[in-house]
Amino acid sequence: MFIMRKYEMLGFFIISLISIGLALLFWALPSSYFLDGIRPTTDSLWQIGKLMFFSIAIYTIIEYYIFGREFENFIFAKAATLFIAPLIYIGASYILDVGLGAATVNNHIVTYALAVFVGQYVSFYILRDGYYFKLMNGYAVIGILLMITIFITYGSTTDKFNSHIFQPMERYKTSIKNLQ
C-alpha cells in the first residue's frame, strides 16, 4: 500500500516530465499518419489533452510493472485517470480562458497541473478503497482502446473542426477575445 501511495503521488511530477520529454521527442521526429495521431500537431487544447493522455498511459505501464499487478482494479483506476485528466484540462482551460478573457500559457500550465493532480488522486482513491466489479477492467480496456483509436484516426483532422478547443493557439486566442 505504501509503494502505491508513493508512486501515485510521484506520478504528478513524473507525468509532467514524460509530457515534456514526449513533446521534445515529437518535435524532433518527422510527420507520419500514426505519429500525428499520438503527438500534438498544433498547440490546441485538444492536442495538449492528447499529449496528456499518452503521457499518463506511459506512466500507467510503468506503474503496472512496479505495483499494479497487486491490485485487481488497477486498470480501471488508471483508466479513470486517463479519461478524467484530459477532460479536466480542456474544460478548465476553456473556462479559465473565457473567464479571464485571454488565453495564456500560465492558464494552461495551471490547469494541466490541476488535471494531472485530480486524475492521480482519483486513481489513488479507487485503488486505496478497492472498488471492484466483475467486468470493470474489461470496460476500461475497451474505453482506452477506443480513445487511442479516436486520437490516432483523427490526429490531424481534428484541427479542422470549428470548435474553440480544436483551434491552434493563435486562432483560439482570437476566438476567446471575440466571445467577450
Image (cartoon, rainbow, N blue to C red):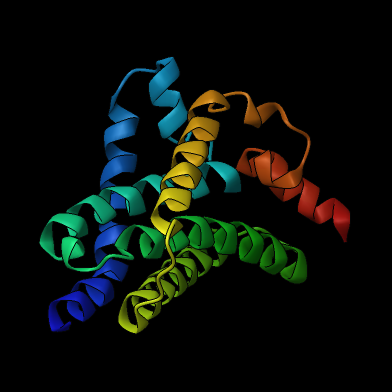
> In the rendered image, which quarter contains the N terminus?
bottom left
Q: Residue at x 27, y 67 (%)?
A: 11
Q: Is residue 44 visible?
A: no
Q: Position of residue 134 (x, y in %)?
A: 42, 61
Q: Residue furthest front?
A: 134
Residue 96 image-quadrant placement: bottom right
Please give the name of the residue rendered at 15% of the width and 66% of the height, measured from the top-left corner. 67
Confirm whether residue 67 shows in the render.
Answer: yes
Query: x%, y% of residue 71?
Result: 24, 68
Front residue (pair 82, 144): 144
Query: In the picture provided, is 62 more to the left or to the right than 43?
Result: left
In the picture, measured across the screen, residue 4 lies left or right of residue 145, that is: left
Find residue 136 and report its image quarter: bottom left
Q: Residue 170, image x and y in percent?
A: 66, 41
Residue drawn at x 34%, y 57% as measured from the top left: 75
For the C terminus, the quadrant is bottom right
Q: Nearer the viewer, residue 133 or 15?
A: 133
- What residue do we see at 23% from left, 50% from top? 61
